[in-house]
Each structure stands twice: as C-alpha cells, then as structure tokens.
Image (spheres, coloured by chain):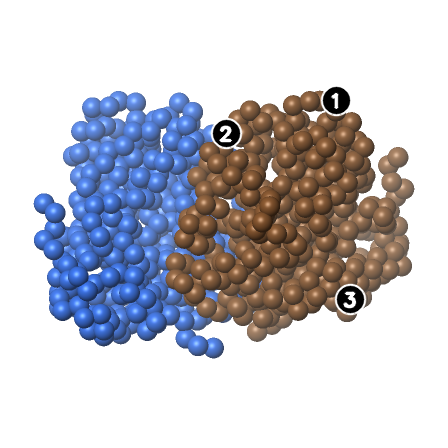
Chain colours: A brown, B blue
C-alpha cells in the first residue's frame, strides 16, 4: 500500500492510521453497542466544549449527516422562526454562504460585510444592532477558512447578548483546537464537523446548542432531513438517528475523540497546530512568500499566501508539482486577489511542514521562480 | 479484533473486508486522483443501470451527501416546480415519508394509499391519473423496506408515461440487485444509496436522472445543500462536490462497485440474494414462522415475519439473545400488526443464513417458545 499524499487543506484531512482502522467494522445502526457509541460521542463533545449537560441552562449535542454545510443549513433553517430576522457578519465566503442559505429559506436577512483581511469588533456589532432593532439572530464564522482569520467570538458574543439576540457560531474549522468558552461567549448554537480539528473522517457535522434554544426550534424547520429539533428529539427518545447514520465515520470519530484527549485536549492540539503554523510561517517568509493576513488576526488552522509576482509562477503547475511529490495544498478563495492556502491541521506535525517546505523550494526552482515576493498589495 | 456481528438488516449492512479496507486512505477532496474516483463512480452507476449517458435523451448521475432520505428529499424538493402537483403511491412507511417531505416543502401533494401487503397495479394508477388531471409528478417506492414488497415499477411507469407525468422511483433497497430497465420503465428520477445492494458503507446517496429532467429542475430547489441541479452542475463543471464529500465512503463504494461487477452485476447479486432469501424462507417456515407477504409479492431484500402467538415470545428478548450470538435482525414497521424483519442483503451468503437459523432455534428453545405460529392474520 503506497503512502497517501499529505493533505495541507482545511479538510478532509490526513487522519491517523488508528482513526481509519476504526472503520474496519460494520455496526448495526440500531444495535445497542452502536447506540452506546453515539451516546459516548455526544457526551464527549459536550465535555470537550466544557459545557454543562444538566442543571440550569444546559447544552445539548446533535449530530447531523452530511458535510458541515448541511449542519449549518440545519441550524439556519431550524433555529430562526418565520418572524425572525438574521444578521450575518461577513468577512469571507463562509459568512456569505450563511446569508445565502438564509435567503433560500425566505428568512429576513441582513448582512454586515467587512474586508476579508479584517476582523469584526464588538463595537461595530453593537452599533449595528443598536441602529437596526428587530434582529433576533446573529451569525458569525469563528475562523473564516477563506483566509484563516480568527474573529473575536467572545467579545462579539457579549454584544449579541446585550442586544438580546440568539448567537449562532460557525466553528467549523476551529472547534477542538481554538479553545472557546461557550457559556461565557453566550453561544446559543455552535456548529462544527467531524473532519476538521477533531481529525475524524467526513460524513457528519455536529451542533452544540443551549437546550432552551433547541426547544424553541420545534416546528421551525423548512425540511425533513435537516430538522434540527426533530434530529435532537430522535436522539433523545431512543438514542438513534432518525435516518441512516454514517456508521463507519462515527466509529472513526469516537477514536479521534480519544486521540484528541490523549493529546491533551484542545490546548494540546492547539500547541501542535501552533508549532505547525509557526514552522510554515518561518519557512514561507524565508522563501519570500507574503502572508495575506496580519499576524495577530491569523489562526493556526490555515494560512493564505499571495501569488508570487514572478511571471514564471503558475498556481496550477505549482500545485501539480507539489501533488506529484506527495503534498496536497489548497487553492485560494479570495474575491480580491490571487492567492493560495496551506492548512496546518490534521494528523501532521512540524516535520511534515518541513518536508512540504523542502518540496516547495524544489518546485520553485523547477518552475524557475526566482522570487516568491508578491506584488505590493492593492491599497 | 473480534468478528463483527452479522447484520440481517436493510442497511447499514455487513460489507466485505476489502470494501472496508478501501477506507484506509485519506484522499484530498479536490485532488485529481479523487476526482477520477468520483468520475468513475458516476460512470459505473450509469453503466450498472444500463442507461446511455450520451446521445438522445441521456441519463446523468448525481451523488448526494447524507442518508438515502437526504437524496429523496433532494429530488422531491428540486424536481417539482412551484406549480407542480405530486401523486405519491403509498404501501408502506417510505411512501408515506415521501408525501411528508413534499408537504413540508409546500408542494401540492396527493396520495393513493393501499394496504401494506398489496402491490400497486398499473390499472389503479391509470384510473387515478385519469380521474385527477393536473398531476405532474408520480412517486413510487420500488421495494418497500417496510415489508419487503416489490411494486411493479415498469408497468406503473407505462401508466405514468401515458399520463405525461414525471416518474420518481425510490429504489433505495432494490437498485443493484433487482434489475430494472430505466428507459423502458420511463423512470425520470431513480434514487438509491451507497449502503444497500451495492454493499458500500453509508454516507451518501445517488440519483440517476434523465438529463432533460435535471435541466428542468434548475431554480426549483428549496434548500442549498439538497439542490439537485446545483449538485449536478457542480460535478459537471469541475468534477467536485460543492461541499465536502465523504471521501472514505466514496473510496469504499468504488471498491464495492468492482466487487458487484466481479459477482456478475445485478443478476449475479440477485442470484445470491435469492439463494439467501430461499434459505431463510425454508428455515423460517420449517420453524413455524409466518411471512407477512404472499410469495409472489416478496423481494429477496428483506422479509417480514409475524410475531409468534406463543405468549413466551417477546421480541426484545428474541432480538437481544440473537444479538448476543452475533446476529442482528430488525424490528418491524407495520402499522397494522406486530412483526419483525430479516434482511438478506449485504456481504452474506446462504451459510450465514443457516447460522442465523440455527441461532433462532436455540433462542426459541431458550425462551420456551413452543410454536412460532402466528395468530391467524386479521381479515
């Protein structure tokens, strides 16, 4: 069996051999042993988030089949009632996608959009909420995978809470590695996916939600499959998914959660991703590449680099030559300038980053790219 | 590694070791090698269905993340325009689910419901369509997993076609093992899932559709994630899923398609499932169990048996004792009488059925069930 290429992407990611080996079993989706797996996953996710699952104001965990976008659509199309009004804070493609989903469902939707290399401030959000009464829900992407930027989720949560609105956080590419205190951040719905920082395989997403908010979602859903309240009620009533779960992906995820715990939880994982990111930044800037974001706004998840100005640089050839050497990087998604992305999450460590950097040096030489300097950014 | 329990269910199923081993790889979801896997799967599914993918009136294949129900909802919420009217032919829970989905999306929906142990006739469908003009779409479940009954999909297709309506067939638990000529049956949309007769693992469904019907679906969708036309257009434009695909489940499915071909395609698979079903019927009737359906209506996919009348029979204990011996059967889903189900699909052969039957004998003795005879069925 030849070694797989290493994935420097925002997911699906390189996973450990033991996570993949957990899929070498067929589980009966309604059998007791598998229901115990589902229960364990839901409990571990709540523990990982550091939230209470009982007592006053508890949180609940709902698993949802499909990609992360399915889980996002589940929340947007279930949490917001017919007379609700959503404000989406946008600094990248994933924020825009949330607004797009809301409009498809006929939800009254407002947007506050800022440039993709700047973060939202609590003051801006407070001003917008004060200027426009009637907003019932606010959605924010924690780590915008478009750029790798990290929005200040807790400060914005305080502003949303002060305006008495419900707070929906897309934590797709941050949960498990960027510690967040859900209760202190006043997060009502947090969405993430199996194949991001928990390092499972793709097949489902999950939602952590305040139980009171889930109860309010009853009857709001615009679909059957993505009905968040019904999915939760099903899991609570008999421990089962309403519709066939991705059994193998769930077995892999249980193993991935154990490995995350063995690594020291989110702080341990953040340390490794931080080391990966530091190695990448050192190596890329040494080679002349310009990162798109200011260092203080940058997550350890994924990093955007500007295309070199050298006319010998062609992204498709750069990508292909790296792929042939066993390294898969990721195209850019900016609306304003040409760029590419390198992810530093998944079952990767700094020596993998060093191997990627060595390959990048080789490929730059092969393409006769004398300098990886970008043109000066557009003012 | 202890052996997994054998799954006598309608899915997720017992799969081959080689199908599961295909998941021991991490693929980049946008990398060329994986895009070739997606292309190959889509082409093989069309070939398996025996439909043309070029020339006059070609068919297309769309893959959709989530369980089979997600794929059904994708078709129902995308194929039927705002001014359409759907007739759902119902003889079980999955037909009822289609009508439920349609009503959630505000689609004008009519139903024709018959008892769960009878099949639809083309004459009944023709009469209904003549009596009620304005029906634009007709939906039928080919093999109703509720009972295992097989509806005459080709004859009904002729009636639907004569009325100039679009024909939607839920072939979830039949496709790949019950040969159907899509063109001759006038099927416009056929839906099935990875973890049924093709013996892959769960994580996505697929839709085979006449290209002309897909083109008509543009702009109809009521969701983002389940937009069938957009999903198809995405696959066509760059070969990629719009949103993260279940990469490991797709690698497993490619292997499962090869193994189906090695077995001689749908007719080879039907022969094995037929042998499984024959062994089950022989053994169960010899033990006194009464099948719910008349033999002529029964598929080789799953079989419903009435509860024994003996007061010592308790399904939960029966299920649990079989599960402890390594055999997972399935509860019933009839609205009218207590029953259970035994599936005969998946990576199982007649010797597995014989092993199950031996365990059933042991368990009946353990429970002191003297006779497995059911009460006379309700007239």
Residue visible at 61% across and 52% down? A52
Badge 3 and badge 2 in a common chain: no
**Position of B318 compared to A281: left or right?**
left
**Residue A350 at x, y percent in the picture:** 78, 66
The residue to which callout 1 is attached is A131
Left or right of residue B182: residue A32: right
Label for residue B344? none
Circle on res. B219 = 2
Q: Which image quadrant for residue B160? A: top left
Task: Of the two numbered discs 1 and 3 on the same chain, state the one appearing first in sequence.
Answer: 1
Q: CA distance from mark 1 to mark 2?
A: 35 Å
Secondary structure of residue under mark 2:
loop
Subunit bearing disc 2: B
Tag 1, which secondary structure? helix
Which residue occupies the foreground of this view, B347 or A5?
B347
Measuring 67% from the left and 31% from the top, which residue is drawn there?
A: A164
Chain under disc 1: A
Instruction: Give the image quarter of residue A325.
Output: bottom right
Q: Residues within 10 Å of mark 1 (few under 14, many from 20)?
A: few
**In the figure, B184 relative to A321: above or below?**
above
| Left or right relative to A90: residue B99 | left
Q: Nearer the viewer, mark 3 or mark 2?
A: 3
The circle drawn on residue A350 is: 3
Output the chain of dot 3. Answer: A
The x, y position of residue B167, in whole percent, is: 32, 36
> How many numbered marks, from 0 up?
3
User: Spatial distance from mark 1 to mark 3, Cα to Cα?
Assistant: 47 Å
Residue A316 showing in the rendered view: no
Front residue of A140/A11: it is A140
Seen from the viewer's position, the closer of residues A128 and B129 is: A128
For the residues tagged 1 and 3, is the chain the same? yes
């Amino acid at each position: 069996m030849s070694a797989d290429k290493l994935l420097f992407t925002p997911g699906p990611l390189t996973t450990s051999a033991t996570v993949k080996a957990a899929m070498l079993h067929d589980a009966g989706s309604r059998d007791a042993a598998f229901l115990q797996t589902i229960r364990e996953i839901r409990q571990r996710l709540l523990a990982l988030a550091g939230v209470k699952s009982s007592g006053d104001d508890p949180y609940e965990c709902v698993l949802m089949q499909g990609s992360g976008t399915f889980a996002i659509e589940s929340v947007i199309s279930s949490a917001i009632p017919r007379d609700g009004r959503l404000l989406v804070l946008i600094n990248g493609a994933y924020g825009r996608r949330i607004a797009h989903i809301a409009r498809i469902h006929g939800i009254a939707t407002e947007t506050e959009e800022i440039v993709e290399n700047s973060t939202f401030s609590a003051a801006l959000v407070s001003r917008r909420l004060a200027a426009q009464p009637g907003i019932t829900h606010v959605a924010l992407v924690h780590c915008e995978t478009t750029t790798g930027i990290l929005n200040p989720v807790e400060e914005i949560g305080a502003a949303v809470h002060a305006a008495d609105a419900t707070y929906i956080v897309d934590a797709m590419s941050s949960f498990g590695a960027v510690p967040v205190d859900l209760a202190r951040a006043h997060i009502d719905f947090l969405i993430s996916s199996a194949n991001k920082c928990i390092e499972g395989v793709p097949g489902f997403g999950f939602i952590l939600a305040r139980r009171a908010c889930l109860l309010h979602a009853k009857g709001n859903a615009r679909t059957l499959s993505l009905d968040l309240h019904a999915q939760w009620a099903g899991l609570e009533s008999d421990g089962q998914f309403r519709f066939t779960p991705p059994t193998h992906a769930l077995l892999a995820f249980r193993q991935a959660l154990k490995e995350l715990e063995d690594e020291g939880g989110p702080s341990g994982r953040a340390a490794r991703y931080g080391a990966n990111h530091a190695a990448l930044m050192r190596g890329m800037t040494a080679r002349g590449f310009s990162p798109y974001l200011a260092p203080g706004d940058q997550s350890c998840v994924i990093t955007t680099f500007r295309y070199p100005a050298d006319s010998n640089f062609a992204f498709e050839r750069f990508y292909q030559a790296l792929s042939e050497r066993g390294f898969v990087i990721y195209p850019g998604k900016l609306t304003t300038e040409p760029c590419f992305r390198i992810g530093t999450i998944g079952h990767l460590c700094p020596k993998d980053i060093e191997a990627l950097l060595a390959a990048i040096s080789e490929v730059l030489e092969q393409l006769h790219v004398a300098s990886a300097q970008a043109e000066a950014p557009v003012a």
